Image (cartoon, helix red, strand yellow):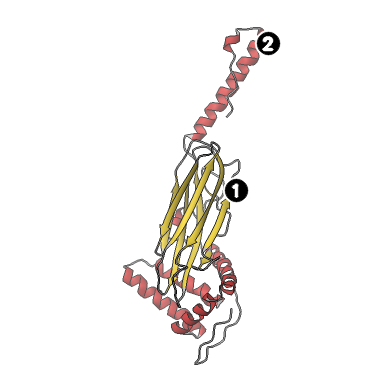
């Protein structure tokens, strides 16, 4: 099952990158997925039946998808492929004026069943953060819903040293690129945290409902004027310090003294399904 899911997501990603109309993309996606299932000797009906089996056993399915996520991350690094605007920041590291500071998992599978419908995260704040920093969190969403309401949210809150908290929420109900932006604010950051939440847990269903998040990034942007301000403060601090020392030694006018400015492949073998479908082995 793990092998099939890895190739299933790769097939969908390749289909999405092919361009063309919505109908053409859907046709390519169905064709590529059919090829993957045929490779392993399964039909779409058998695959859907197995997904439902694991969906009802969320603990086992979560373990499978964690391994799927790790393998897809490895594949992404090998292929170097990007999709949509998210590719603009794919090569950014954790330093520089524009940096990807996300240190948590970059992929996650969610389902509308507690506790798998909620994912909390916290961003470590360090000395690389500055006043007037702005942020953009972005990711690719891939819904695998056979029916029901597609409704998920991303919530991010940033608390500053004056105890002001800026909170932003983004809802996303379809597959594709989603983004959430946090504007700049003229104070130092104390903490940053948030969560993903997939609703629909109260809806009764006998079908598969999965949300797969991947390419999760948190991009930090330093204000272009902040570095100039810091250099200016440093120069003023140095100048005032020298003037204060000269006045103290030479007995000059005390009115000239000034205070110094202080200025984050292989998986298990699979077996063919008999006429009466059984769940695919993990």
Q: Neighbour class for label 1 at 10 Å: few (<14), some, many (≥20)?
A: some
In front: 23, or 135?
A: 135
Q: Give me the residue at 55% from left, 78% from top.
A: 1
Image quadrant containing the C terminus: bottom right
Residue at which label 2 appears: 249
Q: Give me the residue at 51% from left, 68% from top.
A: 113
Q: Quadrant of residue 200?
A: bottom left
In front: 280, or 82?
A: 280
| 239 in relation to 78, above or below | above
In front: 266, or 169?
A: 169
Can residue 139 be seen here? yes
In the image, taking residue 27 as reference, residue 194 lies left or right, namely right
In front: 197, or 178?
A: 197
Counting from the top left corner in percent of width and height, residue 84 is at 41, 59
Q: Callout 1: helix, strand or loop? A: loop
In the image, taking residue 231 as reference, residue 173 lies left or right, namely left
Can residue 84 be seen here? no
Counting from the top left corner in percent of width and height, residue 204 is at 44, 74
| 98 in relation to 59, above or below | above
Counting from the top left corner in percent of width and height, residue 104 is at 58, 56
The label shown at residue 124 is 1
The label shown at residue 173 is none
> Sequence-wise, which precedes: disc 1 or disc 2?
1
Report, in whole angstroms, how far the alpha carbon at label 1 lies from the one at label 2. 46 Å
Q: Callout 2: helix, strand or loop? A: helix
């Amino acid at each position: 099952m793990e092998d099939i899911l890895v190739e299933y997501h790769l097939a969908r990603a390749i289909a999405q990158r092919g361009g063309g109309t919505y109908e053409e993309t859907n046709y390519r996606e169905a064709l590529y997925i059919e090829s993957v299932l045929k490779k392993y000797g399964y039909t779409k009906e058998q695959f859907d039946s197995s997904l439902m089996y694991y969906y009802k056993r969320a603990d086992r399915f979560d373990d499978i998808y964690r391994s799927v996520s790790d393998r897809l991350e490895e594949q992404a690094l090998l292929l170097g492929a990007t999709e949509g605007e998210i590719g603009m920041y794919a090569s950014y590291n954790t330093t520089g004026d524009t940096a990807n500071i996300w240190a948590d998992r970059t992929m996650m599978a969610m389902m509308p069943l507690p506790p798998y419908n909620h994912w909390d995260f916290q961003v470590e704040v360090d000395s690389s953060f500055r006043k007037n920093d702005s942020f953009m969190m972005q990711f690719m969403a891939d819904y695998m819903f056979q029916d029901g309401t597609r409704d998920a949210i991303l919530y991010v809150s940033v608390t500053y040293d004056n105890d002001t908290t800026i909170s932003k929420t983004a809802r996303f109900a379809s597959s594709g690129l989603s983004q959430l932006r946090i504007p700049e604010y003229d104070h130092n950051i104390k903490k940053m945290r948030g969560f993903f939440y997939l609703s629909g847990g109260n809806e009764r269903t006998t079908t598969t409902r999965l949300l797969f998040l991947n390419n999760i990034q948190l991009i930090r942007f330093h204000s272009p004027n902040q570095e100039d301000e810091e250099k200016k403060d440093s120069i003023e601090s140095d100048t005032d310090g020298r003037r204060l020392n000269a006045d103290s030694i030479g007995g000059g006018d005390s009115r000239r003294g000034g205070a110094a400015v202080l200025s984050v492949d292989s998986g298990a073998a699979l077996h063919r399904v008999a006429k009466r479908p059984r769940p695919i082995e993990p």
